Image (tube, grey):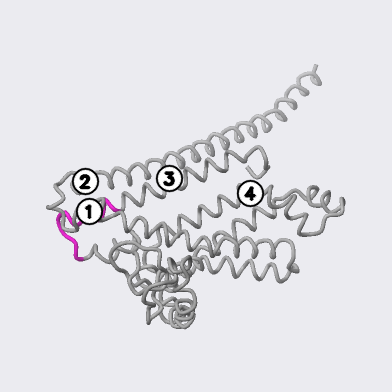
Amino acid sequence: MSTDTTEPSRQDEQAAPASLLRSAKRFGDSLFRSITTASGGLILLILLAVAFFLVALSVPALTEPPEDLPYGPFWSWVLPYALGTIWAAALAMLFAVPVAIGVALFITHYAPRRLAQGLGYIIDLLAAVPSVVFGLWGINVLAPMVQPIYTWLNANLGGVPVFSIFFGGQVSGTGRTILTAAIVLAVMVLPIITAVTREVFLQTPRLHEEASLALGATRWEMIRQAVLPFGMPGIVSACMLGLGRALGETMAVAMVLSPGDGFHLKLLTSSNPNSIAANIALKFPEAYGLGVNQLIASGLVLFVITLVVNMAARAIIASRAEFSGAN
């Protein structure tokens, strides 16, 4: 009888820690689920709060008569800045994306391990450099360095019918042009795009790469057949992150660019289209009354542009989800 009473008690003692462990795991899962749900909801609340703030303070600039607005009719005033924002960001992405993808491929598939680690650290450190530092570098180093190149481009291509659209006009004597600002933006977004694409390329299944090489493909053919298709959604995401940084960049553009009125495609002139963010930074300290509302309304336009760009990126990624395992 004593043996029978002892065995159940030992079983109860063994079952108790297991029950406590299961309870602790369930509590941990519930806590983690609650934290992640609250974090996601907080992001949405912050986005809604920003949107409400922009819309509420933009209403006077959108509803008041155009003659009462200090900068003139709103849409005709903001359109050149919106086009200048898109133009500068597009130029920056044109310069940055091929270089970023090339650097990421070199780090992941060509460079020796020690060199790849060092380059990865340098790329990550570039992402931490403040915008003001890039602006100072653009004014004091880049602009004087590229000004002779601009003069040569203007002299040799400014008279050619097709190229005159971009390289015609009176060339800037300081080098502070929209092209210089785009190069600075390209350098700023380069580490973001490179870091993300590098991590995406490292996630490519090893069996896919080995299978391509086993079928007789060269390393570049393996990259085209296995790495790039698998990483395409990640590349698009990286590009959209960089584009968001380029669209919203303020201080570097405001410091480097020599802004003018209106919009044009010429890259080398001293009067350049300005961006929305840089225009707000330059004019907000002296703005008052409806001028403040008009500048905030231009910020709302930039907010909508960024939102549309990100929605388009998500649509592109979703359309390619069945062709890649990156999601």
Kindly check if marks 2 and 1 are in contact, taking CB atoms under 8 A apart as contact. Answer: no
Along the viewing direction, whichever of 319 and 273 lies nearer the viewer: 273
Decide: is 147 above or below 165: below
Q: CA distance from mark 4 to mark 3?
A: 20 Å
Q: Amino acid at mark 2?
A: Leu
The stretch drawn in magenta includes residue 291? yes
Q: Earlier in the sequence, mark 1 or mark 3?
A: 1
Q: Earlier in the sequence, mark 2 or mark 1?
A: 2
Kindly check if marks 4 and 3 are in contact, taking CB atoms under 8 A apart as contact. Answer: no
Decide: is 1 above or below 310: above
Number of the label disc, if any, that sits on residue 308: 3
Picture coordinates of residue 116, whole percent (x, y) = 69, 67
Give the prevailing secondary structure in the magenta stretch: helix
Q: Amino acid at mark 3?
A: Val
Q: Which residues are magenta?
A: 286-298
Q: Residues within 10 Å of mark 4 (few under 14, many from 20)?
A: many
Which residue position is annotated with label 4? 232
Picture coordinates of residue 73, whole percent (x, y) = 20, 52
Q: Amino acid at mark 1?
A: Gln
Is label 4 in a helix, a strand or a loop?
Answer: helix
Number of the label disc, if any, that sits on residue 294: 1
Along the viewing direction, whichever of 156 and 42 lies nearer the viewer: 156
Number of the label disc, if any, that sits on residue 62: 2
